Image: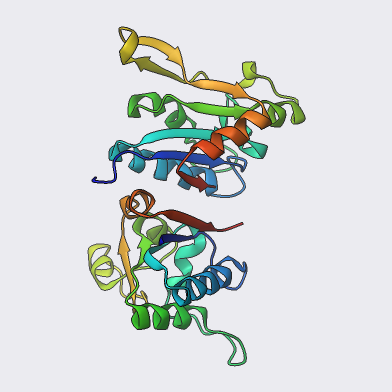
Amino acid sequence: MSEGVKKFLYVNRKAPHGTIYALEALEVVLIGAAFEQDVSLAFLDDGVFQLVKGWDTTELGSKNFQPTYTALGDYDISKVFVERESLEERGLTEADLLELTYEDEDDDWAEKSSIRVVSREEMAEIMAENDVILSF
Amino acid sequence: MKLGIVVNEGPYTHEASDTAYNFAVAALEKGHEIFRIFFYHDGVNNATRLMVPPQDDRHIQQKWSELAEKHNLDLVVCIAAAQRRGILDENEMKRQGKDAENLAPGFRISGLGQLIEAGIQCDRLVIFGD
C-alpha cells in the first residue's frame, strides 16, 4: 500500500434492527480490519442502540449478531466513539452499553475499554480528523 | 482528483442511485478520474439486467451499464450483499446451483475488500445513501 495508512471512520447511525445497515456495516468493518488501516468506529443517533447490551432477537427471527461487537477488540479495533448527546436523548447511559475491550500492546497487553463517550462537538472533530468516512 | 463512489440504495425507491449517477457524469465532465463505483446494501439491485421500468421512465441499470462502457468504469457489486438479494453472475449461478444469472453488462461481482481499497486509493470516497 504505497499510499500508507489512512484513518478510516465507520459511522453507525441506525438502530440494529429494522434495517440491515448495522449488520452490513459490521461486515465492512471486519473485512476492512485486514487492510491494516487506522480504524475507528462512531455510534450516534439511533446507532447507539447497536451497543445497548442484552439483545434478544428470538421473536424477530433474525440472527443475533451482537457478539460480533465484543469481538472487535480481537480485530485490533480499539477506538469506539459513542456520542453522549445521542445516549442522553434516548435515556441511555454508558452503563447500558456492552463492555468492549482491547489489549493494549504498548501497556503489556493490559485489557482496556474501547469505548469513549464523546460530546457532539468532539464527534465533529473526530470526523474532521479522519481521511475516509463510511457512513451507515 | 481520483474519486471512489459508493451506492448504498436500490433503484427507484430511493434517489441515491440517480444522484450518484449524476455526480459521476459531472465528475467525468470536469476531468476527474473515477477509480471505482461500489454497490452495497440494496445498491446491488442497480445491477440486475432484469429490471423493466415503464418506457417513459429512465432505465437506471442501462444508464449505469452505458456509462461504464463509455468511460471504462469499474462497477463493483458486493458479493455478500448480492447473494442475499439474488444478484448472480454466471460464475455464482453455477457455484450456488441456481438456474439463472442476472448481472448486467459493465458490472462485476467482488468482495468488500474492493470498497476498502477504493477508500485507500482515492482522494475522496463519496457515499450515496439514505
B8 vs B107, left or right, is: right
**Quadrant in the rendering for residue B79:** bottom left
Q: Does residue A4 appear anywhere in the picture?
A: yes
Residue at x 58% of width, y 24% of height: A53
**Quadrant in the rendering for residue B109:** bottom left
- Identify the image quadrant of the C terminus of chain B: bottom right
Can you name the residue that lies furthest to the bottom here?
A: B55
Q: Position of residue B66 (x, y in %)?
A: 41, 83
Q: How is the image coloured?
A: rainbow
Is residue B81 placed above or below A50 in the rendered structure? below
Q: Does residue A71 appear anywhere in the picture?
A: no
- Identify the image quadrant of the N terminus of chain B: bottom left
Q: Nearer the viewer, residue A44 or B33?
A: B33
Q: Nearer the viewer, residue B86 or A102?
A: A102
**Quadrant in the rendering for residue A17:** top right
Q: How many callouts does the rendering have?
A: 0
Is residue A56 placed above or below B67 in the rendered structure? above
Residue at x 41% of width, y 59% of height: B4
Q: Position of residue A30 (x, y in %)?
A: 37, 39
A90 vs A30, left or right, is: right
Is residue A103 placed above or below B47 in the rendered structure? above
Q: Nearer the viewer, residue A86 or A2?
A: A2
Residue at x 46% of width, y 26% of height: A79
B72 vs A128, left or right, is: left
Residue at x 49% of width, y 45% of height: A133
Is residue B90 placed above or below B9 in the rendered structure? below
Q: Position of residue B31 (x, y in %)?
A: 42, 73
Q: Position of residue A131 (x, y in %)?
A: 45, 43
